[in-house]
Image (cartoon, helix red, strand yellow):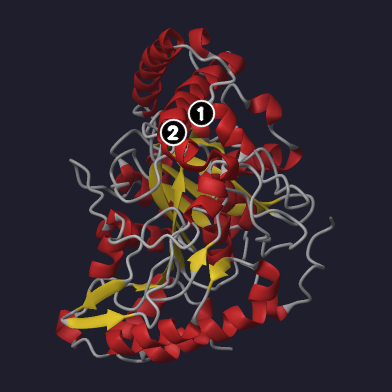
Amino acid sequence: MMPRLYELTATQVLELLRNDTVTLETYARGLLDHVKETESVVKAWALLDPGHVIAQAQTLDQVPVGQRGPLHGLAIGVKDIMNSKGRIKLRDVVYHSHKLDMPTEYGSPIYRGYQPSSDSAAVAILRASGALIFGSCSFIRCKTTTTEFAVTNSGPDTTNPCDPKRTPGGSSCGSAAAVAALHVPLSLGSQTGGSLIRPASFTGVHALKPTFDTISTEGQKAIAPTFDTCGFFARCVEDLQMLADVFGIEVDEPARDILLEEMSIGLMKTPMWSTAGPGTIAAIEAATVILRGKGIKVEEVSFPPEMSDPEELERLQEVITQSETRVSFLREYRIDKDNLAPEIREIVENTARITHKEREQASDRHSHIRRIINDLAREYTVILTPSAEDEAPVGLGDMGRATFNTMWTGFHMPVVNIPAFVGANDMPVGVSLVGPRFRDQQLLKTSLALAELFRARAPRQLSDPSRKQVGNHGKG
């Protein structure tokens, strides 16, 4: 049976749209029909106005073939901490929303109804590339759900498309769920701790957290600026590559194909390994067996002894991120602290009593570790490491911990989640591939080869909630 339009990857859809095999309006209507069938369970979107989606699609359909951008017509969701303006221009056609009431609210009552006057850098680049912004932009009344300011660990009612009794992870929960539920093939998210890689692992999709500061975070709510990183979700590595190209993520040396038998994989369980659950342990073991079965060298690598204390590493990260978050949210605290989440208020009030001296020492120490780990990664084709502690937890209150993610975010190294494995409850469990800083393109090329290898040996297919009895997937 031919796949339905909403089931196609971004790469597949783009080929149809470029050749006018299908109109963008037809594509958009197909997506909206699928959203209508499944959104009552998934709850990936906070706001949705189908009329705005169709109107934008009709406008993009009018763009001459020779003037179409590299992402022409691709539907993309955007996390609700990225600004979207209310009036846009598409190829000399000015498009207004009929109400100009498409707020970017950061998941907070403080910004209810807030209408930015300009796009975030990431949204502007997508728009200029011809994308159909399917969420969190002012000319289509919709945005992906997120936790408050992407800081808190409890969020909206968004469910995991693989099992609605479980969390999709946070804070980019809506962005991950929208891709996993086949609502859109691509979405933007952000990561300060583990808000890209962990939800990708929980929902069974691919994700790229690029090298720090390779994608501008201008127009995105700052949390901890030396950790904040913009990235994206997709259904395959090819689609991650497409977005990396659009965002101008380049390398000094062209990425090259490496024969499997010439690869060298550094297996880094990290000092946090004691927190790994059975699903993650099994996934790492299975990945290792698959790789070695193909003649790939896999070598277990430990953190240097002087930096192998998990409590010290967590404390360094906590001191830096909380100190920066305190600065980032002083404005909201002074304006309307009663409507600020209690955990954010506590950070601004510095109830942890973090001193400037402690912050300075933590930053220096963390920078030292960053250099050492980055140099260590250069000795291998990629680093193999966990994406999450285990399968997605049951319930929506606990969105999981960023135990295995925050270190790589702080080390500024690119990470790709490969959703190749399943746990005991038939839920996705991803593994992370990590590269040295600014070698994102080589990481993506290697990830493509290894994702195909894992998929052939341990297939994991995305779940279409409309084709089964939602709620009966998994064993609890």
Could you tell me if the residues under marks 2 and 1 are in contact, i.e. CB atoms within 8 Å? yes
Count neighbours of disc 2 (C-alpha within 10 A) and say few if under 14, some if 14 to 19, many if 20 or more.
some
- Say left or right for 278 vs 441: right
What is the x, y in percent for residue 148?
A: 56, 48
**Residue wearing tag 2:** 330
Whether residue 443 can be seen here: yes
- The one nearer the camera, 444 or 48, is 48
- The foreground one among 286 and 142 is 142
396 relative to 98, above or below = above
Rendered-image quadrant of the C terminus: bottom right
Q: Which quadrant would residue 340 be assigned to in this image?
A: top right
Q: Nearer the viewer, residue 87 or 64?
A: 87
Left or right? Give the position of 128 relative to 201.
left
Residue 113 coordinates in the image, percent (x, y): 46, 63
- C-alpha gap between disc 2 and disc 1: 6 Å
Where is mark 1, residue-wise?
A: 348
SS state under label 2: helix
Residue 14, located in which quarter of the rendered image? bottom left
Q: Position of residue 190 (x, y in %)?
A: 44, 48
Q: Is residue 172 visible?
A: no
Quadrant where the N terminus is found in the figure: bottom right
